Image: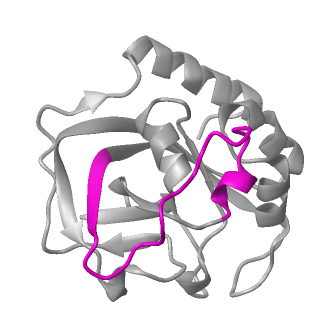
């Protein structure tokens, strides 16, 4: 089972249907091949507790993350995401066109878009439209050092997700409306 590491505040927004987009540049440990959603069609959300995340989202101080994970802490994976469409955005106007559909601040996304290094070029960011589902039987794992680091994907070989009885966080009609907004904002299908 693949886990996608993302700030806890964003994981909560995805789980609660407040957003269905993920914008990602990549982690420091992604390697020279860079980041991609293309090889992982579904994953569970791994909430990270980066201390400054509340300052980098538009929530007006409504979020306070817990302390960083420590070895032995129980991590609960309660949201399964299925990738519906992916885009590689190289035009800042396209990034701005979806700004109302996510919680990250413009400064945060601009910094990611412009960042260059570790095999990643500036002027590019990945976007995934995902369909999130609540898992009636969450997966619980003890945090270990191997789960740390600045990387997007962690594979948990010892666990699997039962996709029976998943509950979509958005009704079909709301998700279809959102998908139409994304396509219109970007001016193209995935």
Side of 61 where 113 appears, left or right: right
Which residue is at 32% across, 28% downward? 168
Give whichever of 102, 35 is nearer the camera.
102
Side of 120 where 44 appears, left or right: left
Task: In the rendered view, tell whether residue 24 sits above or below residue 166.
Answer: below
Give whichever of 57, 179 is nearer the camera.
57
Q: Is residue 174 visible?
A: yes
Magenta stretch: includes residue 67 = yes
Q: Residue at the far top: name it.
A: 173
Characterize the magenta stretch by its predominant secondary structure: loop
Please report the bounds of the magenta region as a residue range.
52-79
Side of 59 where 162 appears, left or right: left
Image location of residue 101, percent across then percent down: 67, 32
Side of 177 where 163 appears, left or right: left
Q: Is residue 130 visible?
A: no
Task: In the rendered view, tell whether residue 51 sits above or below residue 88.
Answer: below
Which residue is at 61% across, 71% downward? 26
Which residue is at 62% across, 35% downward? 189
Magenta stretch: includes residue 56 = yes
Image location of residue 64, percent across then percent down: 57, 51
Q: The C terminus appears in which quarter of the rendering?
A: top right
Image location of residue 141, percent across then percent down: 20, 68
Give whichever of 77, 174 is nearer the camera.
77
């Amino acid at each position: 089972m693949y886990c996608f590491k993302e700030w806890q505040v964003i994981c909560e927004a995805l789980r609660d249907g407040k957003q269905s987009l993920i914008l990602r540049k990549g982690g420091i440990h992604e390697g020279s091949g860079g980041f991609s959603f293309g090889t992982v069609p579904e994953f569970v959300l791994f909430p990270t507790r980066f201390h400054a995340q509340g300052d980098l989202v538009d929530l007006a101080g409504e979020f306070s993350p817990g302390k960083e994970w420590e070895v032995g802490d129980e991590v609960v994976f309660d949201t399964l995401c299925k990738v519906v469409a992916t885009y590689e955005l190289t035009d800042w106007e396209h990034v701005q066109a979806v700004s109302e559909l996510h919680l990250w601040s413009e400064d945060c996304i601009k910094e990611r878009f412009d960042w260059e290094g570790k095999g990643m070029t500036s002027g590019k960011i990945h976007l995934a439209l995902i369909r999130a589902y609540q898992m009636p039987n969450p997966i619980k794992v003890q945090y270990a050092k191997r789960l740390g680091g600045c990387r997007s994907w962690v594979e948990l070989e010892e666990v699997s997700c039962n996709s029976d009885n998943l509950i979509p966080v958005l009704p079909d009609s709301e998700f279809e409306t959102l998908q139409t907004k994304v396509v219109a904002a970007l001016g193209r299908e995935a």
